[in-house]
Each structure stands twice: as C-alpha cells, then as structure tokens.
Image (cartoon, rainbow, N blue to C red):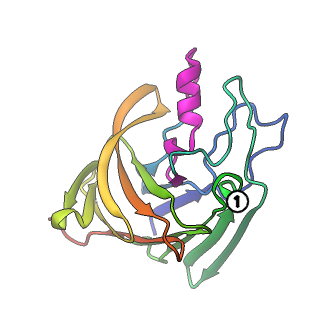
Amino acid sequence: GRTLVIMDAGAPPAPGLDRDAHAGTLSFEMSHGKERLIVNCGAYHGPSAEWRATTRATAAHSTLVVADHNSAQIWPEGGLGRRPNEVICERAEDQGSQWVEASHDGYRAAFGLTHARQLFLSADGEDLRGEDRLTGPAGQNFCLRFHLHPTVQVSLIQDGAAALLRLPGGVGWRLRAQGAVISVADSVYLGGDGLRKSRQLVLDGHVGSGGGIVKWALKREQKAE
C-alpha cells in the first residue's frame, strides 16, 4: 500500500568506519504516503559533544532498550566500543505481505540477554505487527521506544491500554500492546532544520523467568474517533 517501513537490521560498522555510528540496532521508521509516523531522533551535527552522544544512544531510536543501557558502547570522541557481535536477519514475502525477523547480542555481555524483533506488514500497508523478545536471565527492566514525528498527535485511549496517533492529513493509527505498560513522554527530532520538540510512546516491561516479550500492533483506523 502506501506504507513504508525501514529497519536497521545490519551489524554496526567495523572499527575505523564507526566514527559517527549510532547504537540503534533493530530500530525502525515508518511513514504513510509522504507523512512520517515513527522516526528515530536523528543525527546532531552541532558543537555539543553531549548532544552528539545523546542522539547516538539506543534510547534515541525506535527500538528496545535494556536497563537504560546502549546496545553498543558509545565513545564520546566518536566510534563504538562494545557492540553487537552477532546480528541475524531473515526476510520473507507472501502475496505482498512482508515479514522480517532479526536479532542482536549487544546486551549479552552486560546482562546475558539477546534481543529479537519480528515485524509483519500486511499487503495493504494498514497493519504493522511487532514482537520484541528478550531471551536470558530474569531481573532486568526494559522498554520499547516509538519516537513520533513532530507533526503526529498522540493520546492514550482505552484507559491507557492503547494509543491513538493522528497524522496531519487526518489518518489515524491505533497502537495496542501486550506485555508492557504504555506511556507518553517527550522526545526531540533532528531530521530537518534544527532541533524540534516531539513525543514518543514508551512501552515498559520486565524480564521474567521465561524472558521478556512484548507483542504490539499498529493498525490504521478506518474511521475518525
């Protein structure tokens, strides 16, 4: 349909090529037509080393974050230290529907955890389903972050069990999730000229004895609320 999803499913660049690399493995962006819905915060090109590090962090990307740690170690002077060593990705297509399954081990050294993400996009582009899974020892908190483009309006609905996203053109998307608590937080966007304030959806979860798993769905609304 008119929906585009772009996913970072590759390994971080090798040492020497990673000066401006971000710790955003398995993050994704989503647009509908010419309107952007899910984004990453973008890249900072100004003089502040703090802002450069902030926008390179995992939390500045639409992916899973364990215990507020980066999936790759970010050096302030540029480049990456510890990083995912094994990034696996498989992609399939069936009658126009797209499916991607990817995983990385960037949290294995610190927490013994592996992050796997599955994305399924329906052929008509109106239904994006995701599953994020952490495999390994129990005990850690984690969150999924969905950074929104500044033009997107967001509100929690159904007593906080879902969120409604409204694009400037009036198209609505409803996000539901199982295995996490949904909240709305501030964010920033540097995808255009300068820094712009925006919002993000945060899905908080916990790794239990069977690991951690969040199933979520982002579906286009067929009629206005």
Please give the residue where the numbered disc 1 appears in the rendered image: 105
Queried whether the magenta region covers residue 63, the answer comes back as yes
Image position of 111 with respect to 124: above or below? above
Queried whether the magenta region covers residue 114, the answer comes back as no
Disc 1 marks a residue whose amino acid type is Asp
Q: Is mark 1 on a helix, strand or loop?
A: loop
Say which residue appears at 81% left-offset and 36% top-offset: 17
- Please indicate whether residue 185 sits to the left or right of residue 207 in the image: left
**The residue positioned farthest toward the bottom in the image shown:** 95
30 or 105: which is nearer to us?
105
Which percent across, then down, holds residue 13? 78, 44
Which percent across, then down, holds residue 52? 58, 26
Say which residue appears at 63% left-offset and 49% top-offset: 71
- Residue 189 is drawn in which quadrant? top left
Q: Give the range drawn in magenta.
A: 44-66
- Asked whether residue 35 is in view, the answer is no
Which percent across, then down, holds residue 105? 70, 59
- Please indicate whether residue 183 sits to the left or right of residue 124 in the image: left
Image position of 114 with respect to 184: above or below? below
Image position of 118 with respect to 154: above or below? below
- Please indicate whether residue 146 sits to the left or right of residue 170 in the image: right
